[in-house]
Image (tube, rainbow, N blue to C red):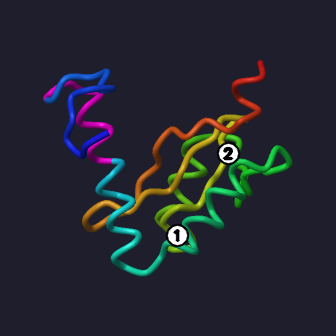
Amino acid sequence: MECGSSRGRKHARGTREWSAFEIAAFCLLYVQEHEQLEDFAHYYRERLDPGFKIKVERDFATRDEAEAWLKSGEAVHCMQIRIDSKGLLVVQLPGRLTLMNNPLPEDSED
C-alpha cells in the first residue's frame, strides 16, 4: 500500500480518531528522534507483561492528606499514589504539582 493511500483507512482525516493516530505517530517519531526508542521498547514490553504492577509510591486516607504531601515538596512528577483505594498520578503543571485521576488496574476489577 502506498504511503498516504486511502485504501485501508478506517477514519477520515479531521476526525477525533484520525487526530489520535496522528498524535501517536508523532509521539513515536519524537521518541525515535531523541534516541529513546530502546527505552520506549522496554517500557512497552514491561506494560505488556501480565505480571506488571504499577508501583504505588504513597497511600493516603484523604485528598487533604495527599494535597498537604504535594505541598511538602516530597512529590515528584509521574508518581503514582492512592487515595482511599483510588489511583492518582502526580502531574507537573506550570508552577505547581497537581493530582490527576489515573485508575489502577485493580480499580477496574471491582
SS label for mark 2: strand
Q: Quadrant of residue 31?
A: bottom left
Query: Disc number at residue 46?
Result: none
Whether 29 is drawn above or below 22: the answer is below
Q: Quadrant of residue 86?
A: top right
Whether 28 is drawn above or below 66: the answer is below
Residue picked out by circle 2 = 82
Residue plotted at (71% across, 36% down): 105
**How many numbered tags mark residues here?**
2
For the residue carrying disc 2, how many other residues have a C-alpha within 10 Å: few (<14), some (14-19), or many (20+)? many
Kindly identify the amino acid type of the residue bearing the numbered disc 1: Val
Kindly identify the amino acid type of the residue bearing the numbered disc 2: Arg
Residue plotted at (33% across, 64% down): 29
Query: Disc number at residue 76?
Result: 1
Q: Quadrant of the image for the N terminus?
A: top left
The residues colored magenta run 14-23
Measured as percent of width and height from the top left, residue 11 is found at 27, 23
Nearest the eye: 41 or 62: 41
